[in-house]
Amino acid sequence: MYIIQFIRGFCMALADSVPGVSGGTIAFLLGFYDQFITSIDDLMRGGLEKKKKALFFLFRLGIGWAFGMVLAVLVLASIFESHIYAVSSMFIGFILLAIPIVVREEKEALCSNKSAALFFLIGAAAVCAITYFNPVSGGSSMNLEHLNLRLGIYVFLAGAVAISAMVLPGISGSTLLLIMGLYLPVVTAIKDILHFDFAALPTVFIFGCGILTGIFSVVKLIRAALERFRPQTIYLIIGLMAGSVYAVIKGPETLDTPQAALSAETFNILFFIIGGAVILGMQKIKDVREI
């Protein structure tokens, strides 16, 4: 069971570290999302026994997550920009193959309230609007070398929003960081610290404080939404996932050296298939464990 939790956390970290689907989506696909959310909420608000059980579960999951995140950051910062179209194609494979799996898993909830499908449109429209009106797209990327109060607040809020998205199945926090022009600067800052260059430590500290604030704020809300309004929440999640395809397509425009949005000419079918195969493989692991 320990190795299973490690692998789960590792897979979540790989999803969280790159724009595409969130770690929450991976938890959803592998069948432990409700346990994940409940454990975080119990750790913050539960009784002693619930806290102990939640701590053991999250600790094992967290080790895998930390290992996966460090590995991803050390590799991604150097290859993301130079292979943006291949990576973006793979992310789209993640998303488009994940959506029907989520629909299948939550078929009962979705069919129980078909009028809630409006929330699908709300989720998709929200992501598309954030991407379209992104103030830092088109090459005006953030420079985090000289922090001031305004930029520090922006980084803090970005951390809170990003972790909220990472916990929620749907658009990844990394996609939102990409939209906000902070993905490469934050990944590079973390990479510098891992190489014992601590000049970016204030940036990472502020970002970390935003993450803690976001996770404490959003988990109870998500748990309540899934318990009381599950059809609406699932439709919203699927809408967020669908809208994130547009965010990934526009992602190259937010790079330090802006590139054209993903197009039919730059789309890489091989990496799209690889992305889809990864998602299907994760679902297969879940199905085998349930037999």
Image: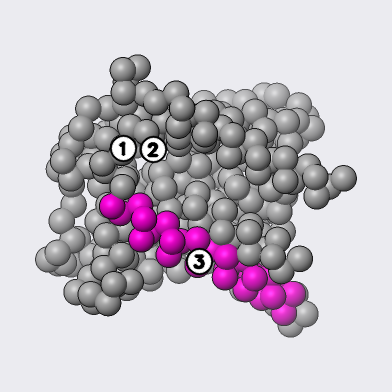
How packed mark 3 is, by other alpha carbons closer than 10 Å (few <14, some 14-19, many 20 or more), is some
Q: Is residue 257 magenta?
A: no
Q: Quadrant of the C terminus?
A: top right
* Three-letter amino acid code of the residue under disc 1: Ile
Q: Which residue is mark 1?
A: 84
Q: 33 and 13: which one is in front?
A: 13
* Three-letter amino acid code of the residue under disc 2: Val
Query: Are circles 1 and 3 on residues that touch, CB within 8 Å?
Result: no
x, y percent for residue 55: 66, 75
The CA distance from mark 1 to mark 3 is 24 Å
In the picture, measured across the screen, residue 264 lies left or right of residue 107, that is left
The CA distance from mark 1 to mark 2 is 5 Å
In the picture, measured across the screen, residue 128 lies left or right of residue 117, that is left
As drawn, the residue found furthest toward the bottom would be 48
| Image mark for residue 87 | 2
x, y percent for residue 20: 45, 40
Question: Of marks 1 and 3, which one's residue comes earlier in the chain?
Answer: 3
Q: Which residues are magenta?
A: 52-78
Q: 161 and 12: which one is in front?
A: 12
Image quarter for residue 208? Answer: bottom left
Question: Of marks 2 and 3, which one's residue comes earlier in the chain?
Answer: 3
Query: Are circles 1 and 2 on residues that touch, CB within 8 Å?
Result: yes
The CA distance from mark 2 to mark 3 is 21 Å
| Image mark for residue 67 | 3
How packed mark 2 is, by other alpha carbons closer than 10 Å (few <14, some 14-19, many 20 or more), is many
As drawn, the residue found furthest toward the right would be 291
* Three-letter amino acid code of the residue under disc 3: Phe
* SS of the residue under disc 3: helix
Q: Is residue 65 magenta?
A: yes
Tell me which residue sits at (70%, 24%) in the image.
Answer: 114
